[in-house]
Amino acid sequence: MTTAPPAGSSPAAPPRASAPLFAPSPTSSERPEAPPLPPVRRTPLLVSGLLAAALTAYVWSAHGAEPGVLLLLGLGLGVALFHSRFGFTSAWRQLVAVGNGTGLRAHALLLGTTATLFALVIGTETGLFGAQPAPSAGPIGVGLFAGSALFAVGMQLGGACASGTLFAVGSGQTSIVLTLGGFVAGATLAAWQFDLWKDLPAWEPVVLSEHIGWFGSWGVTIAALLLVVLVSRRIQARRNPPPLGAVPSARRAAVRALRGS
């Protein structure tokens, strides 16, 4: 979501391209002040917390510690994405539509952090429950390109990507349930017809660490993400877009860390 500049205000001139890398990126007006958060809805919070605790306890007792830890990890990731209102589709849409790359640079930070942690875990072969972490590579071919195109069309029609759909359903937006049903139906159809598309022409998978090591592949990843940051900043400086709309937020940092946006 973007916020249009107030009426009668003159757009600010974009800074020079030589601005420091970590300086704020230009926008046509100042970002509006975030409205205060509404009161906590205690009943849904209590119900969801009890359901999560009960499900974790059942999985842990019936199937052991490993599935229980995986469930806790999944719950933690879901809470983190919901807590921060973090999505993927909107960031690309903001860059293409108005030239605001703020969300895309947040993606670069997230992916860089994830790549660093993955390189440490897999490179040192540090695993839990006797598991030995290893990279998983897949071929790049006709099936991937066709699926990517279908996925892009579906995201635009449905208004969200997979994580955004789950985020919206989890926050109680019933209108997005139809999109969730489409995701489930498409995934089921793809699994049912797996033999039809798995042998389409494709290049053999490449694991970069097998050629330049884990440190080298990590360096290539970070360099690519830095390029994304630089290009998005250059686009934003050239187009001077409106700022992102401010979401409701707590006034004090400590409360904001607890409640999110």
Image (cartoon, helix red, strand yellow):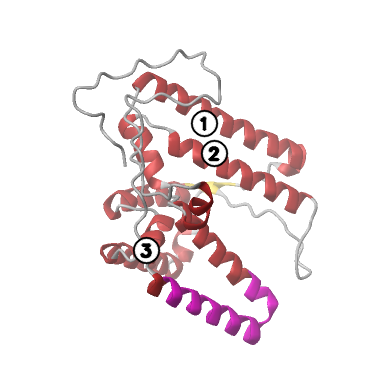
Q: Three-letter amino acid code at disc 3?
A: Ser
Which corner quadrant of the image does residue 11 belong to? Answer: top left
Query: Residue 108, which numbered label?
Result: 2
Which corner quadrant of the image does residue 1 belong to? Answer: top left
**Foreground label between 3 and 2:** 3
State the residue at coordinates (40%, 60%): 167
**Left or right of residue 29: residue 123:** right
Q: Is residue 3 magenta?
A: no
Secondary structure of the residue carrying tag 1 is: helix
Nearer-N-terminus badge (2/1): 2
Q: Which residue is mark 3?
A: 171
User: Label 2: few (<14), some or many (≥20) within 10 Å?
Assistant: some
Secondary structure of the residue carrying tag 3 is: loop
State the residue at coordinates (26%, 29%): 5
> As displayed, is residue 25 above or below residue 132?
above
Which corner quadrant of the image does residue 162 belong to? Answer: bottom left
Q: Which residue is mark 1?
A: 228
Secondary structure of the residue carrying tag 2 is: helix
State the residue at coordinates (38%, 75%): 43
Give the residues drawn in magenta, as a range.
Answer: 45-69
